[in-house]
Image: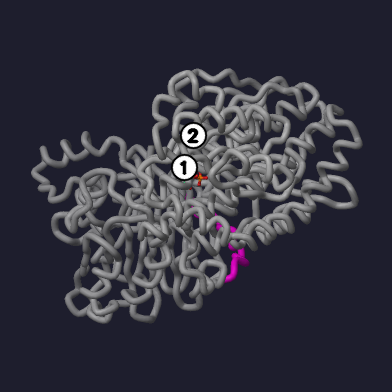
Amino acid sequence: MCGIVGYIGREQAAPILLEGLSRLEYRGYDSAGVAVFDAQAGALAVRKAKGRLQVLSDQLHGGADLDSTVGVGHTRWATHGAPSDINSHPQVSRSGKIAVVHNGIIENYAELKGFLQSKGVPFVSETDTEVVAQLIEYFYDGDLLAAVGRVLRRIQGAYALGILCADCPDQIVAVRKDSPLILGYGEGCNFITSDVTAILRHTRSVGYMEDGELAVLTREGIRCCNHLMQPIEKEIVTVDWEMDAAEKGGYEHFMFKEIMEQPEALRRCLSPRIREGEIVFEDFSLDQDYIKNMRRIYIVACGSSYHVGMVGKYHLERLTRIPVEVALGSEFRYMDPIVDDHTLVIVISQSGETLDTMAALREARRLGGHILSIVNVVGSSIARESDQVLYTWAGPEIAVATTKAYTTQLALLSLLALWLAKRLGTVPEEDFRSMLAAFQELPDKMEEVLSRREDIQYFASRYFNHDSIFFMGRNIDYALGLEGSLKLKEISYIHSEAYASGELKHGTISLIEDGTLVVALSTYSGLFAKAMSNVVEVKARGGSVLALTVEPRKAEMAQTADGVMTIPDIHNLLLPCLGVVPLQLFAYYVALMRGCDIDKPRNLAKSVTVE
Ligand code: AGP
């Protein structure tokens, strides 16, 4: 997804911009560019290149070719117009006086483009962003802020903008609406960025721009104003993420590093919330009357976060006896959802910036729901627009394929289910105690799973050259299969689907032939016998079965399955948290053996901020 970095200071800007952009590569992009003010020429210098950032960096000799102390940079993930040099950002106005970097989408760009073309303004790119640059120049009469203000009143959609003007060489203008933009406060220098990782090397003092806000950055400071152009004071907060946490730390891939970090991430997420035999949510509370009168719970999310919701539905309904609906963020606002002020809407997102999830949140709020979000990125848009937030505290997740965010989301949602059950009086005290004890055992048991990763590597070496792999399971194992299948397909490009085992005979079984690999998930002991019957059905049709079950069931499963992966036994509530780890490792090793670009799978972005 697109990334923005802007710098104004006393050092050479281009190397700082390129280095900052390199920190954003993990977000996924297809081209990159920078614009700086070239003092000698008295004009903006813009350089862009399709492909990896390295291509641009090589063209600019690491930035040495551009002599300037102010500039903006961008990594683009194409929405309007194919990836190309021309469509890359910064986009410039016809005279070259205005340069703009943009994250988001200008929804009414076609209409505005038509208007400008009717006034004789020529366009060179297919992007919506060029409209912004051209429109600023169209309104510009020597007062940049006035021109930007007029543009903001006309554009619709989502945008984080970094704007340079050749007539104002000592400033950057920044604007935000529905797309994240962060201000970085340095010594004699200041920054903008769409992701704090890009500027952490330079400053930890940041301010989060709110929707409708505009900022003017100079070397001396940052002035902010609201949508009425009235000055506002921005709260400056200190980011305490370590730079190391955003680096690979010696591992070959971020994904593997993040898989291995899961026990630690779970400890960070759970330990402060389990104290003296109770669940303590210091960061959140719900009124007892509200809980008692809750009629429905909606879980809204996309991708893996949605899969967390699928597991959560089983847990929440079992523990609280409140009906739970799980909806895709992209579907929610189009399905006329039944939400009122007795509905708790749980919004799940690692990035906190997924546009479909955000749109669902807003729709749920409009309908009167109470919004509780489970988010990883502190200060992200979803976190800020929610009534309440539970942070997963998993630390920065860089690999496109989520791992530690998934397990921490799941653990936190499960803990929330137990907390609600306790408040509702729907869980016997003894069960509450044993479940709470399971949460405390979880990180150590996960370490045990990770320590046996060679077993999974062996199975990956046996099956990595399959063209198609199916996952099946029942109940929580079905929900787990959805995530296992997504993990595999997104990074290895192997076709994969997940089915509820009981559905096999309703159609899917026709796909099973000699050698077809089925990953049979059977961690849930209550349904072990049923799972075995499905394994037999697959075997009878010539399929190969790689099973996942708990250690006590290994021997029994091994009598029929071709291979058995295991996890230590744990309370049902936490089986999917442990069970997902062998599936993550399987996907990782398979992708590694197939030579795939694991951290940046093709066509994918870490944070999907367009519809
Ligand atoms: C999973 O590995 C994905 N990359 C993707 O499905 C992701 O979970 C989805 O885009 C939602 O992102 P979010 O949690 O940041 O909202």
133 or 233: nearer the eye? 133
x then y, percent, for residue 90 = 26, 59
Count of marks overlaid on the render: 2
Q: Amino acid at mark 2?
A: Ala
Q: Identify the image quadrant of residue 145.
A: bottom left
Q: What residue is pinned by disc 2?
A: 498
- Identified at 17% across, 76% down, the residue is 41
Residue 234 belongs to magenta span: yes
- Identified at 22% across, 63% down, the residue is 48
Contact between labelled residues 1 and 2, with CB atoms less than 8 Å apart: yes
Q: Is residue 353 something one can see in this rendering? A: yes
x then y, percent, for residue 154 = 31, 39
Vertical comparison of 565 with 322: above or below: below
State yes or no: Cβ of the residue under disc 2 lies below 8 Å from any atom of ligand 1.
no
Q: Is residue 181 something one can see in this rendering? A: no
- Identified at 51% across, 59% down, the residue is 457
Within 10 Å of disc 1 (Cα), the crowding (few <14, some 14-19, many 20+) is: many
Residue range corresponding to the magenta coloring: 230-242
- Identified at 39% across, 64% down, the residue is 5
x then y, percent, for residue 607 = 44, 49
* Sooner in the amino-acid sequence: mark 2 or mark 1: 1
Q: Identify the image quadrant of residue 343.
A: top right
Q: Amino acid at mark 1?
A: Leu
- Specify whether 101 is left or right of 362: left
State yes or no: Cβ of the residue under disc 1 lies below 8 Å from any atom of ligand 1.
yes
Q: Secondary structure at mark 1?
A: helix
Residue 262 belongs to magenta span: no
425 or 24: nearer the eye? 425
x then y, percent, for residue 539 = 50, 33
107 or 309: nearer the eye? 309
Q: Main secondary structure of the magenta part?
A: loop
Q: Which mark is residue 486?
A: 1
